[in-house]
Image (spheres, grey):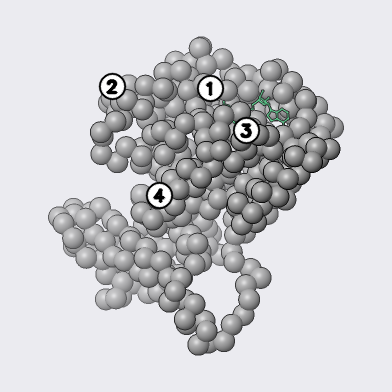
Amino acid sequence: MQIIAVANQKGGCGKTTTAINLAACLAKSKQNVLLMDLDPQAHATLGVNINPEHLDKSMYEVLTPHPERKRRLDEVIINISDNFDLAPANIVLSAIEQELSGKPEREAKLFQAISLMVTNKTYDFIIIDCSPSLGVLTFNALRAAQYLIAPVDTGFFALQGIARLLETVNLINRYLSVKIKTCALITMYDKRTRFAREVKDEIYKYFSGQVFNPVIHNNVRLREASSYGLPVIEYDQRSRGAEDYTALAREVIEMWPASAREGKVTVSADEKKDKQDLVKTPARFVFHAPEASSVEIAGDFNSWVASQESKLKQEEPGVWSKVFYLEPGRYQYKFVVDGKWCTDPKNPHTEKDKTGNINSLLLID
Ligand SMILES: Nc1ncnc2c1ncn2[C@@H]1O[C@H](COP(=O)(O)OP(=O)(O)OP(=O)(O)O)[C@@H](O)[C@H]1O
Ligand SMILES: [Mg+2]
């Protein structure tokens, strides 16, 4: 399951348009997709023709700390079309900022809700539409996501707000073992204007080349489609907007999960060791098991051997942890609790191994 947040503090840069149309194009390519609306404006909900005012439950119920109102994520999901589900929003969601204020782990609520989802279907992608503010809702999205798509329009003030968003991502990355990978998406592009071409160059510099190849052109069909509550591939399949978002979906499928670092320059053994030491990242594994008498970890980083070296220490009653220093890469792992193998209940990111077993997945950039 790939969780992608679509965020940028700048208003009106194409976040919702991207979330809806990327989700719809992924679903059309036979990917199982959940579009999650995490913006109280509920534009993504409206954009797939669901009236937020008629909802009796939304992402508010998923994130509220009030036990009497709380629902599981799977309880609020609405099916939109084949392979395409929606976790809707409505204006009530705006109360979450205040309800969660001062609460412990308030940015982890969405991450926990995704882990606790009870469903017999596996989503290939969860696409989260964020609001333009960098409040607790967006923090929750960034905490849950492995990837961030930052739509950047090519108008005046295009890069405004991006610096703070990237600072936030860096801050979150410092505290997490699963790091967020960021990629910019150029939106509302009009190649006829020199200004747009200049801004495009700036975006490439700013994101050090971490920019999607497909560009989303300015296309009135996208605007019309959203006013009809339809993804553009359903509204006008031959439009430029439909072509652009289809190309984006293709690149997203190719990129992720094929994010293994291919094409790396080969270096000598000594050089490699130096480089590895420089780039090793501490990954802290934590497991809560008050009843357990031993917890070990086995994964790609220790040849899947649950041994003395892979034992977790009980730092405080019931909380077992261990730090591994890992070089950038993609690691599958499992905990071994009193001899029983299990995935990491706190990590929603899983992947099948070659034999079809499901393991937890950790990506280190
Ligand atoms: N490529 C495009 N070409 C033409 N119009 C577009 C394009 N992308 C988005 N729009 C239109 O621009 C407006 C703003 O887009 P959108 O709602 O996707 O931005 P947003 O970043 O989600 O805004 P907010 O910050 O308010 O959430 C909408 O009317 C939308 O239909
Ligand atoms: Mg929006």
The first of marks 1 and 3 along the sequence is 3
Identify residue for label 1: 42
Estimate how packed mark 4 is, as few (under 14), some (14 to 19) or many (20 or more) residues with alpha carbons within 10 Å. some
- Res 140 seen here: yes
Quadrant field for ligand 1: top right
Image vertical order of residue 269 relative to residue 299, above or below? below
The first of marks 2 and 4 along the sequence is 2
Residue 33 vs residue 241: left or right? Answer: left
Q: Comparing marks 1 and 3, which lies closer to the viewer?
A: 3
The first of marks 3 and 2 along the sequence is 3
Residue 66, given in percent of the width and then of the height, sits at: 28, 24
Q: Are marks 1 and 3 in contact (CB under 8 Å)?
A: no
Looking at the rendered structure, the secondary structure element under dot 4 is helix
Q: Which mark is residue 13?
A: 3
Q: Comparing marks 2 and 4, which lies closer to the viewer?
A: 4
Q: Which mark is residue 172?
A: 4
Estimate how packed mark 3 is, as few (under 14), some (14 to 19) or many (20 or more) residues with alpha carbons within 10 Å. many
